[in-house]
Image (cartoon, helix red, strand yellow):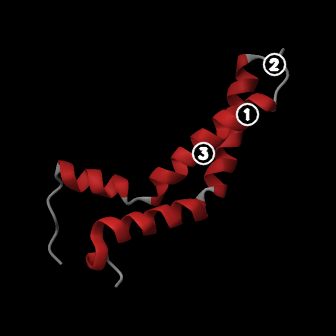
Amino acid sequence: MAKRPVTASYIFFYILFSQDTYRIMIAIVFSLLVAPYTYESDTEIFGRVLLYIMVAGIGFAAGGLPARLITRMLKKLVLGDKAPGK
């Protein structure tokens, strides 16, 4: 297969169909929802930032299966029968 030129549409669809995109989004949302309940009100900013990062890491790890399902669904909807691996 010939190497494809890197265009704006190529980058857009690469990001759209990448599992890591959805894992990162799941991690951020999970961190924003869970981390505020994990620290005391007198915790310093460094401790809070550390907790947000740690919870985001857990969300990234747990987001593997949902991200895979999202990308499969999008590939099926957008590409149909032209999806790779068929």
Where is residue 36? Give x, y as percent.
74, 28
Q: Residue at x 68, y 27 (%)?
A: 49
Most distant residue in the front direction: 77
- For mark 2, does the 10 Å Cα neighbourhood hold few (<14), some (14 to 19), or many (20 or more) residues? few
Quarter in which the N terminus is drawn? bottom left
Quadrant housing residue 83: bottom left
Specify the quadrant that holds the C terminus.
bottom left
Q: Label 3's element?
A: helix
Hey, what amino acid is under mark 2?
A: Thr
Residue 81 on image: x %, y %: 28, 79
Q: Specify whether 5 is left or right of 30.
A: left
Residue under numbered circle 1: 35
Q: Quadrant of residue 66?
A: bottom right
Q: For this view, does 23 lie left or right of residue 53?
A: left
**On the image, numbered disc 3 is attached to which residue?**
27
Residue at (41, 59) in percent of width and height: 18
Secondary structure of residue under mark 1: helix
Residue 73 quadrant:
bottom left
Vertical comparison of 69 with 39: above or below: below
Q: Amino acid at mark 3?
A: Ala
> Which percent across, then down, holds residue 74?
39, 63
The dot on residue 43 is 2
Q: CA distance from mark 1 to mark 2?
A: 12 Å
Q: Callout 3: 10 Å neighbours few (<14), some, many (20+)? A: many
- The tag earlier along the polypeptide, 3 or 1, is 3
Q: CA distance from mark 3 to mark 1?
A: 11 Å
Q: Please name which of the two marks, 1 or 2, marks the residue nearer to the observer.
A: 1
